[in-house]
Amino acid sequence: MYCEECKRKPATVHVTKIIDGKKHESHLCATCAQKDQMDVGVQPSFAIPNFLAALFNLNPEIAAPFVPDNADDTCKKCGVSFNKITQTGRLGCNQCYQEFSDRLEPLLRRIHGSGQHLGKVPQRRGGLIRQKHEISQLRVNLQQFVAREEFEQAAVIRDEIRKLEQGLEG
Amino acid sequence: MSIESIIQKTVSHWMQASGRLNDVVISSRIRLARNLEGYPFPLELSESQALELINQVKEAVAKAPDGPFEYVSLSEISPLERHVLVEKHLVSPQYVENPMGRGVAINDDQSISIMVNEEDHLRIQCFLPGFNLEEAWDCAAKVDDLLEASLDIAFDEKIGFLTACPTNVGTGLRASAMVHLPALVMTNQVNRVLGSLPQLGLTVRGLFGEGSDAMGNLFQISNQVTLGKTEEDILANLSAVTSQIVDKEREARQSLSEGAKEQLEDRVWRAYGLLTNARLIPGQEALKLLSDVRLGADLGFISNLELEVFNELIVSTGPAHLQYFAGQEINSMARAGQRAILIRSRLINADREEQRC
C-alpha cells in the first residue's frame, strides 16, 4: 500500500481518528505522518476534550453521542447534561463527579490507571480525611504489635484509635 | 507594580541561567489545578459569579506573606498586553482568547502566577530556572496552602482535588521540565528518546504547552497521570526520566563535538554570524539560530556569552513583545526588522569580553 498523501512512499503509519464519533482511517508514510501530526498539533481544539470525548464513546455502555438531552441525565446542581460533558470533555461543577460517578469512575481508571487519590490533602478542610488516614495507619501498627504479642504497646495504640474515633464522631 | 512594569521587566526569574543541569534543562514548572466549592466550573460560570470568585481570590492572595502579588484583570488590558503575558509564560495561550471574568495574580520576580477562571477556578504556577522540580513544588504547595487557608477548595476523599477536566483530577498537578535538545535532534535520536515517554506516563509538548510545536529544539516534558500517585512519586518519575534525557543529550553533544567538531563549530558560528549581522530575522529562524548559538556556548565554542541572554531573547523576540515595545501593531516584515535589531544589540551587549574593552 502506498501513502495516501504523497502516493510515492509505502504507507507504514496507520492512523485511526475518531472525530465527532465517526471513524477516519488514514495510511501514510513516515514523512507525511509527521507532517500530519504537526498539523494536528497546531489546533488546540484537538487536544484533551476531543480525546476525552472519544474515550467516553469507546465504551458502548456509556452514552452514545447525539443522544438528546434528557432531564434525568443532568447534574442536579449545575444542570449540565452528561451528553454535554462527553462533547466538551469538561464537567460542569464539582457535584458532577458524584452525579455521574457510575460513568466517571471507569473513565478515571482508564485515564490514570487508578481511582484512588494518594496525594496531598487540604490542610483545613481535609482534617477529617487526615484523621481517617491516621486511624487506618494506627490499625496496621496495632495488628503488628498483636502479632508480636506486645500487648502493652497494642493497648496504648488501641486507646489512641478510640480517642481519634471519638473525635470523629463528636 | 502594574501591567506596564510587569512587561517592562523582561527578565523573569526562570530566565536566569542558573540551577542544576542548566546546560540542558532550561526551566522547571509546577502547575496545580484547584476549584472552589459552591461555584460551577469556569465554563458554566456566570459573569457575576466570576467576579465574585475573583474578589474572593484577590482577598486570599492579599494575605500572602512572601509578597506582593500584582493582580491583572485580563479585560482591563489590551489584547497585545495579554499576548505578552502568554509569551512570558505567565498565562496559557487558550486563556487570553476570552478575557471576560478572568485575571491573573503575578508575584514580583514572576516566578509565581495564579490564573483565575482558566479551565479551573485556580491555576497556580511556579516557574524556576534549571532542573529544580522539588523547589518549584514546594513553592506551589505553599501558595496552595495559603489559598486553602481562606478559600473552600473542592476536594473529594476518594478522587482528590476536583477539576473541570477528568485528566487533572486527584493531585491536579502538572510538573514540567523544559529541555533544550539540539544534539538529539541533529543526530535524529529525538523521536526515539522521547517516543518512549507515553509508556512512562509522560507527555512531550512544544514551547507553549498543549498543542504547540517544538520550536528552537525546546521540548516540554510533563506528567500525564494525576490520580493514584503521590506528588512526590510524580516528581520522582519525571525527574528520573529527565535526568536520563539530559544524559542522552550530553552524550550526543559529546559524540558530535568529537566526531564532527568542524561541522558543528561551523554551524554555531554561522548562526552567530547571521544573528549578529542579519537585518530581517523571522521568528522561527531566530529560535533555530539561537538554539545553535546556545549549543555553541554550552560546548564552550563561544566562551564569552552570558547564558541568560538566550532565555530572555526566546521570549522578548516573540511577536507580541516586539509590537508592544514598538508601541504599535506592526506587520511580520517590520517585526523581523525589530527582531534583528534586538538580537544584534543583546548578543553584542552580552559579549562580556567586548564589554571589558
Image (cartoon, coloured by chain):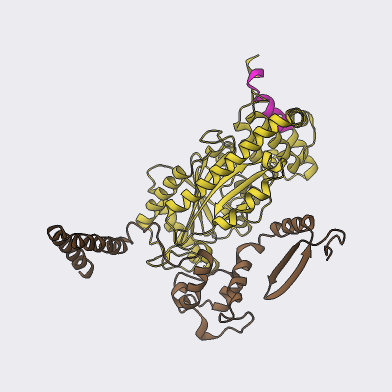
Which quadrant is the C terminus of chain B positioned in?
top right
Q: Residue at x 80, y 36 (%)?
A: B280
The stretch of residues the image draws in magenta is: B341-354
Based on the displayed image, in which of its 4 quarters is residue B154 positioned? Answer: bottom left
Q: Is residue A30 visible?
A: yes
Q: Position of residue B265 (x, y in %)?
A: 73, 28
Chain A display color: brown
Q: Position of residue A86 (x, y in %)?
A: 58, 74
Farthest left residue in view: A152
Q: Residue at x 77, y 61 (%)?
A: A12
Magenta-drawn stretch contains B343: yes
Q: Position of residue B51 (x, y in %)?
A: 49, 61
Magenta-drawn stretch contains B324: no
Residue closest to the eye, B176 or A68 = B176
For this view, does B249 lie left or right of residue B231?
right
Q: Residue at x 60, y 63 (%)?
A: A48
Farthest right residue in view: A8
Q: Is residue B163 above or below residue B299?
A: below
Residue closest to the eye, A38 or B193 = B193
Magenta segment main secondary structure: helix
Q: Is residue B165 visible?
A: no
Chain B display color: yellow
Q: Residue at x 53, y 63 (%)?
A: B167
Residue closest to the eye, B142 or B235 = B235
Residue closest to the eye, B217 or A99 = B217
For this view, does B261 lie left or right of residue B310?
right
Q: Is residue B162 above or below residue B184?
A: below
Farthest top residue in view: B357
